Amino acid sequence: GAVVSQHPSRVICKSGTSVKIECRSLDFQATTMFWYRQFPKQSLMLMATSNEGSKATYEQGVEKDKFLINHASLTLSTLTVTSAHPEDSSFYICSAGTSGWGTQYFGPGTRLLVL
Amino acid sequence: EDKVVQSPLSLVVHEGDTVTLNCSYEVTNFRSLLWYKQEKKAPTFLFMLTSSGIEKKSGRLSSILDKKELSSILNITATQTGDSAIYLCAVEEQGAQKLVFGQGTRLTINP
């Protein structure tokens, strides 16, 4: 079946630093990748939709300059949290889909803690 | 604004019981409704429903969509402790591909 990986699985960083999270589709080509954030005991909130070779589409309230998304190939998308602050601490999950699919396959998530 | 509401938010039952989880939605151009199970990490896919009235089944889990009532249910029979998880319902719009998630139902199965 479709496998999506994320790296790192957990990261702790100091306030003000930048953190890059990678999302890879391992056995299929993903034309679209999605980035979600999940706070404790809350549901997944879509941050942005990323299409290969074009600019990401951000959801309302998500700062594009703070959460940089790059989708350079059909198997890799990256999310960079720039100048991270403690309130950015969260569980970040990516998912991947192919044009025409209704199903998205999720990566295992990255837990970010900003001190 | 698209909206997905799940109920109950939390449910505690004994092993062997049957549970029914609910999901209702308001979307502009409905394409599909999906159910996911989330344990400690990312959600795993359970079902995708597009047609009303057709039950999808996988072992002890089953789900059905009612487009007239704009809702879906997820049934789990003969529950086991391994069914303890958060169950998420999500809706996809036509042409959008992005998913709108409900708040989830936290299901706890006690031995």
Image: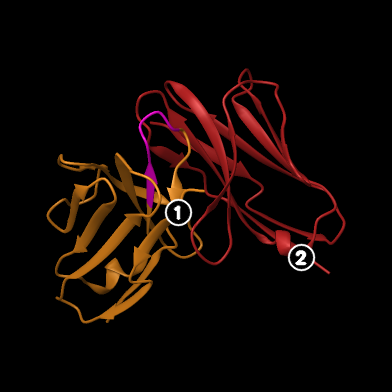
Chain colours: A orange, B red
Quadrant containing the C terminus of chain A is bottom left
What's the mark number on residue B21? Answer: none
Q: Which residues are magenta?
A: A95-101
User: Which is closer to the viewer, label 2 or label 1?
Assistant: 1
State which chain disc 1 sits on. A
Q: Which residue is mark 1?
A: A3
Other residues around mark 1 within 10 Å, as few (<14) / some (14–19) / many (≥20) = some
Residue B101, horizontal then vertical, whole percent: 48, 43
Q: CA distance from mark 2 to mark 1?
A: 26 Å
Is residue A89 rendered magenta in the image? no
Name the image quarter holding residue B34. top right
Can you name the residue that lies furthest to the front here? Answer: A27
Residue A97 left/right relative to B70: left
Name the residue type under label 2: Thr
* Residue drawn at x 51%, y 28% as measured from the top left: B32
* Residue drawn at x 21%, y 42% as measured from the top left: A52
Q: Is residue A72 something that shows in the picture?
A: yes
Name the residue type under label 1: Val
Q: Is residue A49 above or below residue A107?
A: above
Residue A94 left/right relative to B59: left
Q: Is residue A92 something that shows in the picture?
A: no
Nearest the eye: A84 or B10: A84
Q: Which residue is mark 2?
A: B81
* Residue drawn at x 47%, y 48% as measured from the top left: A2
Residue A83 left/right relative to A86: left
- Label 1: which secondary element: loop
State which chain disc 2 sits on. B
Nearest the eye: A72 or B20: A72
* Residue drawn at x 39%, y 60% as measured from the top left: A5
Nearest the eye: A66 or A23: A23
Residue B107, horizontal then vertical, whole percent: 69, 57
